[in-house]
C-alpha cells in the first residue's frame, strides 16, 4: 500500500467514524444468534421461537448421548472443532468484557453452557473425543429444516488409535476458558469443566496426530486443519495455565512454542503470528500469553514481540509489511471464505491487547511509527462500525440490526417456513424451491453476521452466494466481546 492509498484510507476511516451505533442493541442480538443455532431439546426460555427441537437422537445409534451443541453455520452438521473455538471465544469475551455486558451477561453464559454441556457429553468416554455429528455430504445435498432432517446423523470420534489433537485440544481450551467464566457463579460446574479440560488435554497431547488423517473423508474440506495441531496444543496449555496457575502448563507453553513455529513452516498453508481463527491459533496465543508473562518486554519468549508484530501488520499506516488488505471502505480482508471472521477476530485481539498495553503502560513501535492502546481501539471500532452499517452500502451485515441488512442469508432454518407456519415435513428436495426463491427469508435469524461484502465493498444478498451470505458461530463469537467493550466505551 503506497503513501497516497494509506492517506485516503485513513481519511475514509475518520469520515465514517462519526456514525454512531447502538452497541448495546447489537450485543444483545449477537448473543441471541446462538439461540438460533441450537441443536437438541430447546428450553422454555428459548427466545428465537421459530426454531424448535431437533436432532434429539444424536449418538443414540452407538449408545452415547450426543444431543445438544450448535450447528456451526447454515447447515445442520455439528462440527466440534469450530464449535469449540467459538466457545473459547465466547468465554474469553466474558472474561475480558463481561462486566460491560450487564443484562446480557446471563445470556452469554447460557450460550457458553449450551456448548459446554454438549462437550461434557462428547468427552464422557475416556480415550474417545467425538469430533462431529452428521454426515456433511448428505446434509449439504439437502435444503432441510433442522427439525425435519432425515440425513444420516453419524457420529465421528478420534481415539488413541486414530488421534485428533487439534479438535481435542481446542475442546480442552474451551472447557478451561469456560471454567473461569462460570467460577464466580457456579463453582461446582466450573470445577467439573476444569477437571474435564485437564483430562482431554492430556489425551490430545499423549496421542498426537491430526484428525485430517483419521477423519479426513468427513471433516475435509469443510473444517480440514491446515495449520497443524501444535498450535491447538499450546493454546490449550495456555488456557489451562490461566485457569489453574499450574507451573506444568506454563512449562509446556514455553517448551512447545518452537514446535509451533516449526510446524507452521511445514504445514499445508502455514501459520504465523498474524493468523487467528478456528484453524490457526497463533495470534491468539501470543496475545493471551503476553499478559501471562507480565508484559515484560525484556522477556526472552517471543509472545510479546509477536503480538506487537501482529498489530504492526494490521495498522493501515504502519510502515511494516501487512498481513491484511483493506477494502476502499476500510474493511479488513484476508484470504479465505467468510471474510468477516477475520475482521471480528482481529478486532477482538486488538481490543484485548490494548487493555494489556494500558495496564503495562506500553506502546508499540512499528519501525519509526509509534502506536498506543487508543490507536488499537480506533482500528477495532472502525471494523465493528463497518459491520454495523458504516460502509459504502450503508448496510448492516448483522441480521435484524439497523434499517438495512441481508434478507436472503444462506441458512436452512431461516429460509424455510417454520413449523409454526407449515407443520408438514419438508423433505430433502422439498426445500429446493425455497433455496432458489428470490423472496426474503421468512424467519429472522436475529444477530446473525454473514460472511460479508467482497473486497470492493459490494454485496449481492444472494442465498446461493454462501461465501458472503452464510453466518457462522465463529464470526459472531469474537464480535460479542468487541461489542461488549464498545457498549461501555461508546465514543
Image (tube, rainbow, N blue to C red):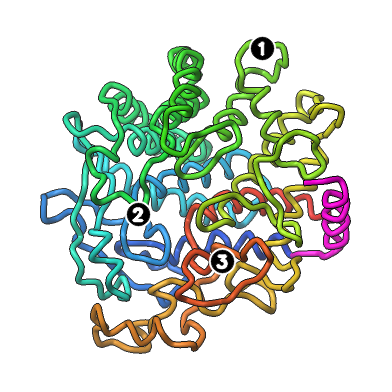
C-alpha distance separating marks 1 and 3: 41 Å
The one of 86 and 138 positioned closer to us in this rendering: 138
Residue underneath mark 1: 299
Q: Which of marks 1 and 3 is nearer the N terminus?
A: 1
Q: Which of pointers 1 and 2 indicates the residue nearer the eye?
A: 1
**At which x and y percent is residue 416?**
38, 81
Q: Do the residues labelled 3 and 2 touch (CB within 8 Å)?
A: no
Q: Which residue is drawn at 46% across and 53% down?
A: 110
Name the chief secondary structure element in magenta: helix
Instruction: Give the class, few, some or many, for how many residues have Cα within 10 Å of label 1's Cα (few <14, many ≥20).
Output: few
Q: Which residue is drawn at 55% across and 30% down?
A: 285
The one of 141 and 131 positioned closer to us in this rendering: 141
Q: In this view, does 268 lie to the left or right of 446?
A: left
Q: Earlier in the sequence, mark 1 or mark 2?
A: 2
Report the span colored magenta: 1-21
Residue underneath mark 3: 447
Depicted 455 relative to depicted 265: above or below? below
C-alpha distance separating marks 3 and 2: 18 Å
Q: Are marks 1 and 2 in contact (CB under 8 Å)?
A: no
Q: Which of marks 3 and 2 is nearer the N terminus?
A: 2
Q: Residue at x 21, y 58 (%)?
A: 58
Depicted 35 relative to depicted 202: above or below? below
Residue underneath mark 2: 69
Amino acid at each position: 500500500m503506497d503513501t497516497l492509498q494509506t492517506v485516503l484510507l485513513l481519511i475514509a476511516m475518520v469520515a465514517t467514524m462519526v456514525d454512531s451505533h447502538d452497541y448495546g442493541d447489537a450485543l444483545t442480538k449477537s448473543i441471541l444468534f446462538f439461540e438460533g443455532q441450537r441443536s437438541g431439546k430447546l428450553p422454555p426460555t428459548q427466545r428465537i421461537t421459530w426454531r424448535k427441537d431437533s436432532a434429539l437422537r444424536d449418538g443414540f445409534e452407538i449408545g452415547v448421548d450426543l444431543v445438544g451443541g450448535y450447528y456451526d453455520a447454515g447447515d445442520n452438521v455439528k462440527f466440534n472443532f469450530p464449535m469449540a473455538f467459538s466457545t473459547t471465544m465466547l468465554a474469553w469475551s466474558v472474561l475480558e468484557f463481561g462486566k460491560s455486558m450487564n443484562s446480557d451477561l446471563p445470556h452469554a453464559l447460557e450460550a457458553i453452557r449450551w456448548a459446554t454441556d454438549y462437550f461434557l457429553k462428547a468427552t464422557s468416554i475416556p480415550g474417545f473425543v467425538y469430533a462431529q455429528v452428521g454426515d456433511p455430504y448428505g446434509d449439504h445435498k439437502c435444503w432441510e429444516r433442522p427439525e425435519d432432517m432425515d440425513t444420516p446423523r453419524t457420529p465421528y470420534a478420534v481415539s488413541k488409535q486414530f488421534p485428533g489433537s487439534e479438535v481435542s485440544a481446542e475442546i480442552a481450551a474451551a472447557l478451561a476458558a469456560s471454567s473461569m467464566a462460570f467460577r464466580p457463579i457456579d463453582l461446582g460446574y466450573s470445577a467439573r469443566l476444569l477437571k474435564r479440560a485437564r483430562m482431554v488435554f492430556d489425551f490430545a497431547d499423549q496421542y498426537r496426530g491430526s484428525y485430517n488423517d483419521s477423519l479426513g473423508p468427513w471433516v475435509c474440506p469443510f473444517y480440514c486443519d491446515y495449520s497443524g495441531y501444535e498450535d491447538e496444543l499450546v493454546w490449550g496449555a495456555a488456557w489451562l495455565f490461566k485457569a489453574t496457575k499450574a507451573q506444568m502448563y506454563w512449562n509446556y507453553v514455553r517448551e512447545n512454542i518452537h514446535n509451533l513455529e516449526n510446524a507452521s513452516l511445514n504445514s499445508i498453508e502455514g501459520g504465523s503470528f498474524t493468523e487467528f481463527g478456528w484453524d490457526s491459533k497463533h495470534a491468539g496465543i501470543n496475545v493471551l500469553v503476553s499478559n501471562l508473562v507480565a508484559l515484560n518486554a525484556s522477556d526472552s519468549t517471543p509472545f510479546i514481540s509477536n503480538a506487537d508484530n501482529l498489530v504492526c501488520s494490521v495498522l493501515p499506516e504502519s510502515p511494516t509489511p501487512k498481513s491484511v488488505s483493506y477494502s476502499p471502505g476500510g474493511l479488513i480482508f484476508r484470504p479465505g471464505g467468510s471474510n468477516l471472521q477475520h475482521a471480528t477476530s482481529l478486532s477482538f485481539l486488538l481490543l484485548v491487547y490494548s487493555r494489556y498495553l494500558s495496564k503495562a503502560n506500553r506502546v508499540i513501535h512499528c519501525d519509526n511509527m509509534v502506536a498506543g492502546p487508543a490507536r488499537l481501539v480506533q482500528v477495532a471500532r472502525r471494523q465493528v462500525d463497518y459491520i454495523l452499517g458504516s460502509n459504502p452500502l450503508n448496510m448492516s451485515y448483522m441480521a435484524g440490526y439497523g434499517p438495512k441488512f441481508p434478507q436472503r442469508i444462506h441458512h436452512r432454518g431461516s429460509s424455510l417456513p417454520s413449523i409454526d407456519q407449515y407443520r408438514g415435513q419438508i423433505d430433502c428436495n422439498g426445500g429446493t424451491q425455497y433455496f432458489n426463491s428470490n423472496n426474503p427469508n421468512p424467519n429472522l435469524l436475529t444477530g446473525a453476521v454473514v460472511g460479508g461484502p467482497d473486497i470492493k465493498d459490494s454485496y449481492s444478498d444472494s442465498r446461493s452466494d454462501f461465501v458472503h451470505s452464510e453466518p457462522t458461530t465463529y464470526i459472531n463469537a469474537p464480535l460479542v466481546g468487541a461489542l461488549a467493550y464498545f457498549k461501555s466505551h461508546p465514543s
